[in-house]
Amino acid sequence: ARTAALIVAAGRGERMGGAVPKQFAPLGRSTVLAHAVAAFQAHGGIDQVLVVIGAGHEAQVPAGVRAVIGGIERRDSVRAGLAALDCTHVLIHDAARPLLPAPVIDRLLAALGTAAGAVPVLPVADTLAHGDALLGAVVPRAGLLRVQTPQAFRYDAIVAAHEAWDDAATPTDDAQVARAAGYDVVTVEGDNALEKLTYPQDFAAAEARLAARLV
Ligand code: CTP
Ligand code: MG
């Protein structure tokens, strides 16, 4: 197998705000994006790393790492990356999830031995409810999952799934694209370290994890 890591880093980070898009912000001794790249480079099961970057941000790609230009929606960026790859399996990952424990990659690669797709998941711990200013009905959380990245696929399957996807809808991840095309996606255990950096306060949690070597 030839296994690629595809890191999407072409977003604008609007909910985060800040001087630069969140994936280029400092984290520990490097940047958010550099952490994600390093996690894959350090894993023996990953043969190549490709970063999808926004036009004008090419200088933010760590030295020696291949990059292509992304698109308007996350899915456009994923498709640009997939088109540039020559591999049998691909792990599609958000640059905004910089802390990626090696055992998660191990579990995904093991699952790909038999499945077309595999995703890391965690259970929901909080009570879930509808509502705005006023609290609405509770959503039963039994059986609900938090779906993280990296998401691992057979390359031919995820390419075919993206081709079949209805362009009118905007998926938030690739597993839903694979499922819509009829592919089975199995779950593996995720990791709290993989939490996505979405809002400013999320950086403090990531810095604390790094400082405590919790990844
Ligand atoms: N992404 C991308 N191309 C896009 C949009 C998103 O490569 N057109 C990437 C982001 O860089 C991020 C991942 O997809 O690594 C997950 O997206 P999200 O957390 O929503 O990041 P942003 O879209 O940058 O943030 P926001 O939605 O707050 O603007
Ligand atoms: Mg977004």
Image: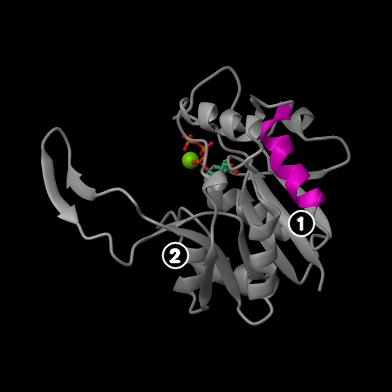
Please state which amino acid type lies under the numbered disc 2: Asp
Q: Position of residue 33 (x, y in %)?
A: 69, 36
Q: Position of residue 140 (x, y in %)?
A: 22, 60
Residue that extends furthest to the top in the rendered view of this protein = 19
Q: Position of residue 194 (x, y in %)?
A: 56, 47
Q: Secondary structure at mark 1?
A: loop
**Is label 1 in contact with label 2 (beta carbons under 8 Å)?**
no
Viewer-proximal residue, 205 or 46? 205
Q: Secondary structure at mark 2?
A: loop
Q: Position of residue 176 (x, y in %)?
A: 46, 65
**Quadrant where the image shows the N terminus:** bottom right
Magenta segment boundaries in residue numbering: 30-42
Residue at 55% in and 32% down: 12
Disc 1 to disc 2, C-alpha distance: 22 Å
Q: Which mark is residue 131?
A: none
Q: Please identify the quarter of the rendering in which residue 180 is found.
A: bottom left
Q: Which mark is residue 166?
A: 2
Say how many tags the image has.
2
Residue at 82% in and 56% down: 48
* Residue 68 can be seen in this image: no
Residue at 70% in and 29% down: 31
Viewer-proximal residue, 87 or 115? 115
The crowding category of the residue bearing disc 2, from other C-alpha atoms within 10 Å (few below 14, some 14 to 19, many at least 20), is: few
Q: Report the residue marked by disc 1.
A: 84
